[in-house]
Every structure is written in structure tokens, then in C-alpha cells.
Image (spheres, helix red, strand yellow):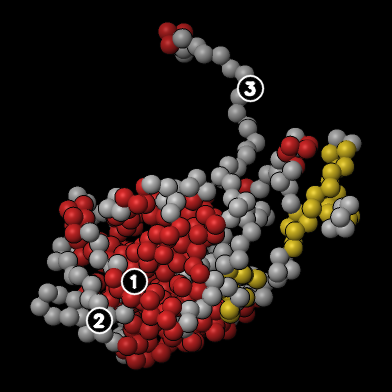
Amino acid sequence: MSTTHDNNPAAKLELDGKTYELPIIEGTEGERAIDISRLRPDSGYITLDEGYGNTGSCKSSITFIDGEKGILRYRGIPIDELAEKSTFVEAAFLLIYGHLPNRTELRNWSDSLAEHQMVHENMRFHFEGFPVTAHPMAILSSMINASSCYYPGLMTGQNPTRFDVQASRLISQVRTIAAFSYRKSRGLPTIYPKKAYKYTANFLHMMFSMPYEDYEMDPAAVRALDLVFMLHADHEQNCSTATVRTVASSKANLFASAAAGVCALWGPLHGGANQAVLEMLQAIHDEGDDGSKFIQAAKNKTRRLMGFGHRVYKNYDPRAKIIKKTCDDLLEKLSISDPLLDIAKRLEEAAIHDEYFVERKLYPNVDFYSGIIMRAVGIPLEMFTVIFAIGRMPGWIANYKEIMESPDSRICRPRQIYTGKEINSYIPLDQRA
């Protein structure tokens, strides 16, 4: 390490007999990065980092994660404080606007969500175009894009004065679209939102009520699902959030950027993790196992344990610590008898107490517990990733806003190392083998 002429620290890189000084950037929590933005124009070289595991794609003030210490903070506030004292709606405001709302701001924010929760009535015809076999994530992404067509102001360039309305409209309507998608897939009549219900309760109402009878709300179930939404609200530069930022960098509108995020989240290596947990539990049950044989197979590395360990958290997922208690309380409150949940508890006990799992820090993560909660609440398996998308929407919107407001924002355009053929020639069709 050296210092530049203005006494800022810099790294030295030697290439082809020349030395290049690369500025060192330090974040507010001490993370350090080597700024390589001048590397290619100055030296002709680029860096290669498959999957961007060691590459900082942006500077952001939204979420901080320390995977080694098991820390997650939204705008500097520890996630455990928010989980104990806040709600998903309040956390959404915090992420998007950078501060906790005062009483007036929170009331206006909640009123705006209620005002914009209805999708345009003509969108009902779009739902009819999907087969009953359509995955809810495909419908969700398509309908978010379709919804934008009913707001011409979205298509006429960036209008900061309309951002507040568009943000509340998107957060509110995503649950309406999700519920409509589920009802369509089951051949059930559409249930409209009720202004009297708060955010999460309204979603459950639209999911499970019938025209002749409203769904009976259990406060414990509503609170548990609200917590699932909150714990998924943002998680730094994951695949879907990075996708939203990439699309936003082209100055695409908010709805198009969010729809792209839904598509990225759909992948089984990302948002499908909690669904994979329940599929694992079902497979164990179908084999007549109570989990004991599976645990041994996982130790022998012949079976993969889903919902344990985390790519970012090298210790314990802080969200899992929070959601575990809510999960335990909910199961006790609902007195559910479910063989899959019994298997889940056996796997959890093994992961917490078995030396094999403890040594490898294969603790249950947030996907493990959120999957159990959603099953207990009655959310069908195909909707698990949709729930994730609803929860993640505030983080996507916050990152979109950050891109649009940054004076240094540039369109994302990664480089590559070409490994194909050298100069080649066109061969006429009649001469090809």
C-alpha cells in the first residue's frame, strides 16, 4: 500500500514494467475496496471475477451486512431492533427514504398504500390469458409490467415528483397481483382488497377469503408473515437487487426494473430456497424417514441439506435467530399436527446440537424457518417465492431510487475475456460439411 499525492491510501499494481496506483475506498463500517475504474483506460487490463464475488458494483447507503459477524442493518438499524419494534410497512419507508417516518409520514405512507392497492380493472382480462398451470412468478413479473401500461407517466422519462406515488403503488399492488395470481391458478373467484385491513392482513384476506365469508385472521399468523416480509425486505447486492440496479441504470422505469428483479428472484439458487426446504421435507416424508436417515446421508454428503448455512453469513444468519422464536410461537399457538413440521424440528435439533453441523456452521437459515411459517399459515408451495418477492420490493425500490438520484450513475456494462475463435471466415452454405 502507498499514498497518493493527496495523502489518500492507494494500492500499487505492477503490469508490464509499469506501476499503477489504485485508490483505496473505505466505507463507513470499515469495508475497503480497491478502485479500478481507471485500470483499463490507463493500462489496457481489466479484472476477471466470475459471479462478482469479490467485486463491489456500487456504493450504497441502504443496507449493511457483515457475514463473518452475523450483522444485518437497514439504514444502520440492527435487524433485531426492527423485528422487535417495527412493521414491514414502516421498514419499507425506512429503506426507501432513509429514515424512520414520524407519525404524520407513517400515516400518509399507510394511506397511500391503501389508496393504490387496487389494480386497474381492465387488468383482470390479462389474468385470463394465463393457463392454470402458469407459475405465479411468471404471472407476477408479467403483470407488474402490464400494470405499468396503465400509468402513462411511467413511460415519459423520469419524473421525481411522481416517485412517491409509483413506489407506494408498486409495493401495494404487488400483493394484489400475487393474490389474484394464486386465485386464478386455483380457479377461485377474485377477492378485492379491503381498506380496513392493514398490509399483511389484506394480503391474507385476498388469498383466502371467499365472496360469502371473510378469512378468519389469526393475529399470530399475520404477525409471523409480516415478519417474513420484513426480514426479506433488503439484503445488499444479491442477484435480484443487482439485476434491478442494472436495469435501472439504463433509465428503465420502476415497474420494468422491479419485474426484472422478480425474474432474477425466481431462480432456484436465489428466491427458491425456502421452497426447496419444503420439497426436501416432503421427499424425506415420502421415503418413510423421520429425518434420521437423511441427517446421516447429509453427513456422508450423499444428500444435500436445504435451508442450512448461507453464502454470506459465515456464522449464524441473524434473521434466523429472530424468525426461529416467531416460528416456534406460531406452531405452538396454532397447535398444528404436520409430519413435515415434525421432520423440520428433528433437522433443526441436529443442526444446532450435532457436532458435525456445528463445526461446519451449518445452522438453519432464514429460508428454513420462513418455509415452515408459510406452510403453517397455509401459503401453498408455489407461492413461496412470490412471498419473497413481495417482501423484497422495498429494497428493490430503494436501490432503484439510489441509482436515479446518484449524479455518478452510469449504465452498467461489464467487460469480458473473449475465449472464442480467432479471426474466422464465412463459408458459403454449399461448401459446409
Question: Amino acid under label 1?
Answer: Leu
Q: Quadrant of residue 106?
A: bottom left
The part of the image, by quadrant, that contains residue 188 is bottom left
Q: Which residue is mark 3?
A: 422
Question: Could you tell me which residue is drawn at 26 percent across and 85 percent down?
Answer: 217
Q: Name which residue lies at 34% across and 71% down.
A: 112
Which label sits on residue 113?
1
Q: Secondary structure at mark 1?
A: helix
Residues under labels 3 and 2: Cα distance? 66 Å
- The x, y position of residue 1, in whole percent, is 87, 56
Crowd rating for badge 2 (residues with CA inside 10 Å; few <14, some 14–19, many 20+): few
Label 1 crowding class (10 Å Cα cut-off): few <14, some 14-19, many 20+?
many
Relative to residue 10, is residue 94 depicted above or below? below
> Three-letter amino acid code at disc 3?
Glu
User: 282 or 179, which is in the foreground?
Assistant: 179
Question: Is residue 275 something one can see in this rendering?
Answer: no
Q: Position of residue 323 (x, y in %)?
A: 47, 81
